[in-house]
Image (tube, grey):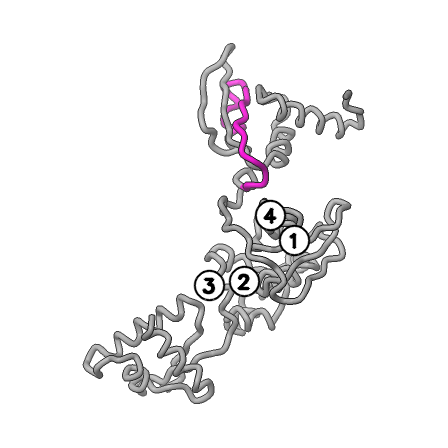
Amino acid sequence: MERLVRIAAMLQAHPEQGVPGDTLSKVAGFDGGADAGTQLKREIRHLERQGWQIENIAPAGATAVYRLTTVDNRLRVRLSPGQQAALRRAVLLADRVDLVQRLGLPDESLSSETKGAPAAITAAAPDALSLVVDAVRDHQVLRFGYKGTPRVVHPESVRNQGSTWYVRGVEAADLDDPVLKVFVVSRMVDADADAPGTAQPVPTVRHPGLHPMSWEIDPPVDVTLEAPAHFDPDVRRWLGEPLSVEPSEGERVRMVYRVTHRAALRTRLFELGERVRVVGPDDVRAEVIAALDAARGETVPA
């Protein structure tokens, strides 16, 4: 680690002309032997994996001269490779040259990856997306309306699933007992962000998968479903793999799912329709029935 710090410090001290490879080898403590160049390249690769952008600016065939390009590498350090890929796609679709530079993407990637992109896809980037990306990067509190309710959110990450952008974070009211929630960026109303550094660190994501059924929004509960055996593949396609499956009466099967996102469960149950029924627990059954009654415009008896 000390060697990496010395190399990075030397590069940062010479941002324009760069530093010859021989000089960096001496700074790193290599003895100048035959393997010094190989050892230096290995250390530079370590720095690059941490988000530093280092390039050899010497002509082909000449002794290497390394230069550090100043970029904001906090996203690379904080976000997973999948999250970085989603953000790069957002940057390219939004045609945000300033974010291209901050992420350390080469300028030519902007034109090459967006060349020929359908206008409808480019236009699909939500208006608030760049604000959300900045808020995640700079730890800014987000303020927006969502489902008719004002929200104050400490953001954790932003990602894309099925051409829909989501931001995950903890609402200010839940900071004492953090609950990670997911918001659709395109549904955010009058979005704004506080000053950089105002957002508090939020818990590490415990369910990093993109499938909404894996998001830990609600306390976990084991839900038992029943379906005709020939509908088993349909249930798995919508809900994923169950914890257990047992045969039931009349060529039916009972499937147990550990649910941490009840709204996602209800949405998928509605898609499955009569192919599946909720056996228990009673409170989950009541929520599903109430949601169906609300969709029909009926009043649920007290």
Can residue 93 be seen?
A: no
Q: Earlier in the sequence, mark 1 or mark 4?
A: 1
> Mark 1 = which residue?
153
Residue 110 percent across, percent down from the top left: 56, 69
Please tell me how crowded label 2 is: few (under 14), some (14-19), or many (20+) other residues with Cα within 10 Å: some
Of badges 2 and 4, the one in the foreground is 4
Question: Which of marks 3 and 1 precedes in the sequence?
Answer: 3
- Position of the C terminus by quadrant: top right
Q: Quadrant of residue 51?
A: bottom left
Badge 1 element: strand
Amino acid type, label 3: Val
Q: Amino acid at mark 2?
A: Arg
Query: Mark 1: which amino acid?
Result: Val
Q: Is residue 229 magenta?
A: yes
Looking at this view, is 276 or 285 the one in front? 285
Could you say where residue 104 lies in the image, as x and y percent from the top left? 50, 71
Q: What's the mark number on residue 176?
A: 4
Rendered location of residue 268, percent (x, y): 61, 32
- The span from disc 3 to disc 4 (Cα, nearest Å) is 26 Å
The N terminus sits in image quarter: bottom left
- Where is mark 3, residue-wise? 77
Q: Earlier in the sequence, mark 2 or mark 4?
A: 2
Q: CA distance from mark 1 to mark 4?
A: 13 Å
Residue under the point 77% across and 20% down: 301
**Magenta-highlighted residues:** 215-235
For the residues labelled 1 and 2, the Cα–Cα distance comes to: 23 Å
The circle on residue 88 is: 2
> Do tag 2 and tag 4 residues touch (Cβ < 8 Å)?
no
Structural distance between the alpha carbons of marks 2 and 3 = 15 Å
